[in-house]
Image: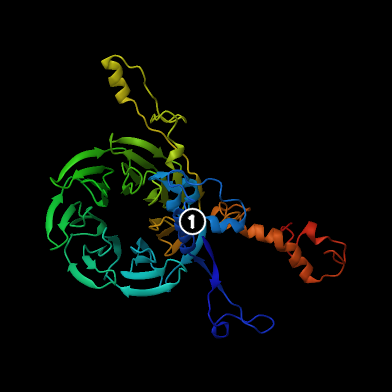
């Protein structure tokens, strides 16, 4: 899925230091190119070699040459079902991007065509990064204060941004500012969401209100009042007339946008709700919410109850995102910089019961009396799962934004450490795919793999006295370590 290409077209004009022989080094920039895999997948479909109802299994082998057979994320989801969700876990670090003048990053969004990443910083600047080579493209001063929220319309024709002063701005895809609502809210705008047909949008703010606006004329239509503290997040269901909001009062509320009525309140969290997002793929009937009580809850909208409660983070959970292709993949980020991936299919047991095999829930069957039915309804059918992959040190500080590429092959995270980091699917037989030493603190990652394979060549290049790497004193370097580094062994 990714490879290297030269970072300088003319090495003679680069600023890199020269080699010992006088020539200049040529840096290689890592590139993630989805065109080859997408083209191969379309050819398979045209030639009849790919069955959409049952994707081919076992094509990928643990060998780097099988990289050409790695298909896009959509190829591993048949009829909207995640048949091979494990193929699309973003576990491999690709690139770190940061501005020269570094500021905390509150939100990021992929542009609709997926070719660039839009980063909004605490200084009010918009920065565009290339989505394939991750190089800087442009920067502009969009707001006077910190930008806290961004949202593209479903039609991909408009962008809305909100800042810390309650100012809301309309943007075209070329970043032409066409409208400004200076006093949309009395306090910071924390989140923005569009209705399914883009005719309306909603904003939530620290002034404890949620407002629904007419997009065409920029007029406020109604205000959703019910939260008793700062409203930190809001989302509009992609197909249903349903709005979700989360607040500092520990409550998640579901609203009917036509009548401004709260239709349900979820009381599961014990601290500030930090993020909620509707499921964007699959059956779109799940809602994920995170909180500063170190938990993430997945709610079933059909029963208005907890489906899964996740408590394996060591710090408060600050961000959550659903995979755009696989409805079973959920990714969370925490205030300690850790990043966790979950596959919800690992929770649902055989038989379709909501009870967990690991002690999370209790199932009641053959309840013949009314009291038995009432008792069954009162039992908690909540399960728990563990992360299929953890990156404990994905960031140095809190993660504020977790955003998937529209095609599902890339993941971007950003936060307080003032950097945007890109994660990708791993190549076949990549030794650092799941245990990169820099981000997992395990001495078995790619760096150690390279040292163990190349240390003999390094020793031979030293041309020390003796034969086979043995010095004058008879010390075998391959057993005792490198000179001055006795702890580094082969």
Residue 110: x and y in percent read 36, 62
Q: Is residue 410 left or right of residue 121?
A: right
Q: Quadrant of residue 469?
A: bottom right
**How busy is the neighbourhood of tag 1: few (under 14 within 10 Å), some, or many (20 plus)?**
many
Q: Is residue 396 visible?
A: no
Of residue 445 and residue 124, the one placed in the foreground of this image is 445
Residue 75 horizontal/vertical position (percent)? 45, 51
Answer with left or right where residue 251 lies relative to residue 484. left
Q: Quadrant of the C terminus?
A: bottom right
Q: Position of residue 384 (x, y in %)?
A: 43, 36
Q: How many marks?
A: 1
| Relative to 376, residue 459 above or below | below
Q: Is residue 145 visible?
A: yes
Residue 156, x across and y down, in percent: 28, 62
**Residue that badge 1 annotates:** 394
405 left or right, relative to 184: right
Residue at far top of view? 369
Looking at the picture, tell me which residue is in the foreground, 439 or 192: 192
Nearest the viewer among 222 and 282 is 282
Circle 1 SS class: loop
Residue sitting at 61 percent across and 51 percent down? 62
Q: Residue furthest front?
A: 47
């Amino acid at each position: 899925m990714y490879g290297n290409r030269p970072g300088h077209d003319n090495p003679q004009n680069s600023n890199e230091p020269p080699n010992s022989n006088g020539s200049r080094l040529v840096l290689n920039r890592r590139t993630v190119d989805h065109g080859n895999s997408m083209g191969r997948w379309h050819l398979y479909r045209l030639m009849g070699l790919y069955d959409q109802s049952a994707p081919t299994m076992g094509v990928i082998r643990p060998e780097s040459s099988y990289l050409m057979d790695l298909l896009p994320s959509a190829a591993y989801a048949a009829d909207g079902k995640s048949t091979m969700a494990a193929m699309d876990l973003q576990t491999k670090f690709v690139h770190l991007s940061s501005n020269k003048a570094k500021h905390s990053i509150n939100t990021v969004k992929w542009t609709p065509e997926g070719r660039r990443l839009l980063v909004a910083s605490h200084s009010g600047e918009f920065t565009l990064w290339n989505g394939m080579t991750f190089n800087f493209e442009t920067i502009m001063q969009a707001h006077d204060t910190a930008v806290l929220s961004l949202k593209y319309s479903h039609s991909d024709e408009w962008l809305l941004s909100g800042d810390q002063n309650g100012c809301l701005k309309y943007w075209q895809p070329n970043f032409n500012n066409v409208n400004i609502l200076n006093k949309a809210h009395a306090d910071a705008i924390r989140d923005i969401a569009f209705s399914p047909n883009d005719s309306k949008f909603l904003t939530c703010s620290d002034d404890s209100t949620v407002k629904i606006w007419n997009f065409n004329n920029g007029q406020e239509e109604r205000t959703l009042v019910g939260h008793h503290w700062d409203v930190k997040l809001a989302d509009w269901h992609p197909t249903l007339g349903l709005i979700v909001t989360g607040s500092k009062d520990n409550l998640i509320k579901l609203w009917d946008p036509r009548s401004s009525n709260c239709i349900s309140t979820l009381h599961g969290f014990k601290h500030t709700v930090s993020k909620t997002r509707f499921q964007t793929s699959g059956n779109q009937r799940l809602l994920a919410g995170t909180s500063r009580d170190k938990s993430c809850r997945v709610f079933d909208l059909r029963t208005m109850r907890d489906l899964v409660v996740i408590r394996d983070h060591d710090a408060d959970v600050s961000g959550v995102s659903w995979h755009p292709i696989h409805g079973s993949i959920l990714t969370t980020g925490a205030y300690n910089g850790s990043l966790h991936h979950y596959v919800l299919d690992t929770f649902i047991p055989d038989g379709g019961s909501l009870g967990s095999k690991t002690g999370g829930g209790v199932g009641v069957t053959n309840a013949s009396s009314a009291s038995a039915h009432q008792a069954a309804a009162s039992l908690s059918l909540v399960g728990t799962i563990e992360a299929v992959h953890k990156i404990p040190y994905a960031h140095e500080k809190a993660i504020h934004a977790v955003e998937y590429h529209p095609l599902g092959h890339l993941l971007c995270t950003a936060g307080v450490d003032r950097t945007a980091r890109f994660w990708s699917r791993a190549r076949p037989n990549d030794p650092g795919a799941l245990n990169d030493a820099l981000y997992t603190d395990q001495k078995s990652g790619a760096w150690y793999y390279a040292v163990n394979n190349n240390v003999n060549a390094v020793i031979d290049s030293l041309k020390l006295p003796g034969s086979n790497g043995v010095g004058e004193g008879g010390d075998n370097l391959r057993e005792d370590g490198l000179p001055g580094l006795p702890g580094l062994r082969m």
